[in-house]
Image (cartoon, rainbow, N blue to C red):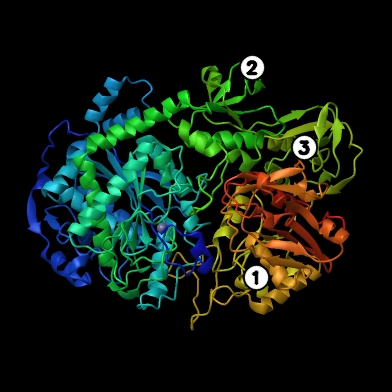
Amino acid sequence: MIRSRTKKRRMSAVFSLAAAALLMLPGATGLSAQAPKSAPAVAAKAGTDEEFARLVRVWTTRPEFLSPLVDHLPTARGVPSPKDVLGYHIGQPKRLTYYADMLKYYRALAAASPRVRVTTIGTSDEGRECVVVFVGSEESIANLDRYRGYLGQLADPRPLTEAQAMEIVGRAKPLYHLVGGLHSGETGPPEMLMELAYRLAVEDSPLITRIRNNVIVSITPSAEPDGRDRYVDWYYAYKTGETGENISYGGPPYWGKYILHDNNRDFNFSQPTTRAILDWYLQWHPPIMHELHESVPFLYTFSGQAPQNPTLDPILYGELPWFANFEMAQMIKYGMPGVWTHAFVDMWYPGYMGFMASNHNGMLRMYETYGNGGANTMKRRIGGGGEGGMGAGGGQTSREWYRPMPPYAEVEWSLRNNTNYMQTGVLSALELTSAFPRVVLENFYRKSRNSIEAGRKEAPFGYVIPAGGPDRTRVAWVVNILRMQGIEVGRATSAVTLKEGTFPAGTFIVKRDQPYGRLAKILLEKQTFPDPNLRTYDDTGWTVGLMTHTDVKEIADSAILDVPVQPVTKVALEGTVSGAAGSIVAIAHHGSANMITLRYRLKDLDVGAAERPFNAGDAEFPAGSFLVDAGTGAGALARVKAAVNQLGLTAAILPSAPDVPTHRVDLPRLAVFSTWGSTQDVGWVRHAFDAFEIGYDLIFKEQVRAGNLRDRYDVIVMPSQGRTGKGLVFDLPPVGKPLPYRKSDQFRSFGMYGESDDVTGGMGLAGVVEIEKFVEAGGVLVTLGAASFFPAEFGLARRVDASRPSAQFYAPGPIVEAEITQPSHPVFYGYTAKTLPVRYAGGPLLSIQGLEAERERQTLMRYRGTDAAILSGLMKGAAETRNRPAIAEIQSGKGRVLMFATNPCFRYQTLGEFNMLFNAVLHYNDVKR
Ligand SMILES: [Zn+2]
């Protein structure tokens, strides 16, 4: 499923049923240009698989859960069915397929059938191959590159006349892309897709033949290969005995290396698996991308309900219910209950993986099919309980206008049921696509053309990103994110004068009259939520300039469209080192997050930090600038210069040390604490630390309870997790037997990133005592987001209270203004403005008891808490946050507790906030008491 915010609160990551995703690409030609050639190996059919037909009826728990599209399987001489390779039919109870076996099957199918091809598109963190499987007629597969070319032309129709475009529409075929396994706990789609691929390759029914001729189907077998194997291991280790309402053993602590469900929120495509799919998408331009998830009963087909992003093409909002209603009608016709649409997830947040299709003028499609989080057949009771709103899960058995034949309140459910529903739905979607390939292609073309036209007619006409500021690295980040998404960015070849101002040559220019001009607007504009009475499924704000603290100017002057530019491929970082004589290198802290990388790259050198700004020549060095004495040690100066250049920083060589108070920048012995049950937000912090080359140990309850933390660490970072202090301390409830997470011959994916003899139980009070000793003995505890409930609730910051806003308050991830109240504190090195945009992270509302002066001193940053301070997205009830600490610092014994109510390393999006955490690490022993 796409995990809802509400569910995130209620269920630990480990114990949730996970979900899978599907992508689809449409783009079909109305008439196939050539009659398909016959393929003797495929055409020589031997009949139908009697065993399959018999077993599927056994495994399907009620007759109405089967459809005429999937109640049979053809045999084809020489072409292996899934069973021929795997040893079992898809949907066999208590059978899940490991990723390598899936690839083995697809490769065997491709080797035997000219209607199938497998291509490699990337590699996962743990080294598994990411692939796309194409299935179509022999003619389609033989000419894949030609069809790719047609779609590329429709995706960027600027060189085409209308007549030429229509001619290409007539020759092209829609590419319909399906994605399974994005969410590893959603186990059904990767199984179903193997059978679907086989069926599409060999069945000669009129329907399948038409699909094969008119549509090219492409498949991501499992979008998170590492997580697939770890989840299947977990299933075989713990879950095969689960029954009915006793789904106790959740899932493994990790799917991929860092994150779980948030691989469907990887806004900046920071993970290799999501990035591989984006890169593939931008080469192939599938007009439809269909994510296959699992959660609600029995099959939910997404139709794009409100709130909708109004920048996307209105054609899309007609296409989504067109497909969803067709599927619902077909499946109801087959007698399948529980197929519904309209009331789950919405079209607001653009960072779901499959939105890469909608964002690029294609169509995102999405299913949720009922699943048991494994392959057991189980009695399930389906939540009634009134309207659940936008997908909170309530009311799923009620009859509604969008659910004319609701799911049953109680059901015996099997993996084969899941396969039947999903495959019947997908075949219906392909039926529609194959019946209207030309409409799908023409819509794709029209949406692309409209995006260009919209940029010519409607303000904003573009965006200007000034390049001449003191920090080049954040500008480079923003431009490279746009480029990664296929958005064209240019550099002005001479000075530009617009109504908004004059900008020098070299300024980055984003024009809206381009195929992905709409996406540029979606990413760069301020988000204005359409109706404060609506709720939404994920964040309401994401404005890239605000998230990264980068100046991005919206341009209402259409003259920007005519500015001559040099196209940018990618911005390479390039630093500057001025001056020559001397051995002191001063590196300016202008807010680049790369400052910490520099410190780690020079970890063997003495580095100081200026505590106040200073000038050297005509250059300004803000507080927090580094001072390196490179006079000693062979090659030190060359190393410093090289690192400054690679990291895009600004440095000057000085003849002597400047007259400014400094302190040494020592690197702490750093630990990141993680529960076993809530590893995802920890994963985002780990990912940021790894990306910026910050050294740390990942520790769990085992290491905490072992004690002596102060002997081993100077700083412990507790990323957001656990939801409450109690949740962080007690974590997963015990299940009556230990649940080890250790690598073994049988479960080879276990033990990655940490090992445990029992992942349940949490650190407990014994762990709290060890954390307290650590702080009392001089350690620094840094808590982020929800983890900041912990020191308040367990007395480590006993004069701080952490509360929650009222039920009327609603703030799904807006960007709000915060005020720095202790500007000279090292946490704010590199920040020059008095107020900053920060993402409201739903952390605790902190209040500090005591004398006013004391409270002021302990509040480092606070929320403004006015409506005017909401910079992007929705916050209802802003006054509840007024003047609440966004960062508080409490002395405790010889140590400190630094509490962020914000989440400074959120999903690799909040680059502008990274430095507050990075500075806290670098200057851990430099805070004046
Ligand atoms: Zn999912």
Quarter of the C terminus within the rendering: bottom right
Q: Quadrant of residue 678?
A: bottom right
Q: Is residue 789 above or below residue 819?
A: below
How far is disc 3 from disc 2 in space, using C-alphas?
A: 29 Å
Provide the secondary structure element on which disc 2 rests: loop
Provide the secondary structure element on which disc 1 rests: helix
**Could you say which disc has been placed on residue 725 in the image?**
1
The kind of residue on which mark 3 rests is Ile
Picture residue at 68% right of the left edge, 68% below the top: 790
The kind of residue on which mark 1 rests is Gly
Residue projecting furthest to the right: 659
Disc 1: residue Cβ within 8 A of ligand 1's nearest atom? no
* Ligand 1 quadrant assignment: bottom left
Picture residue at 36% right of the left edge, 61% below the top: 294
Picture residue at 31% right of the left edge, 30% below the top: 149
Q: Are marks 3 and 2 in contact (CB under 8 Å)?
A: no
Residue projecting furthest to the bottom: 736
Q: Could you say where residue 910 lies in the image, as x and y percent from the top left?
A: 62, 47
Which residue has dot 3 on it? 587
Q: Earlier in the sequence, mark 3 or mark 1?
A: 3
Q: Quadrant of residue 121?
A: top left
Residue 208 or 502: which is nearer the viewer? Answer: 502
How packed is label 2: few (under 14 Cα within 10 Å), some, or many (20 or more)?
Answer: few
**Could you say which disc has been placed on residue 747 in the image?**
none
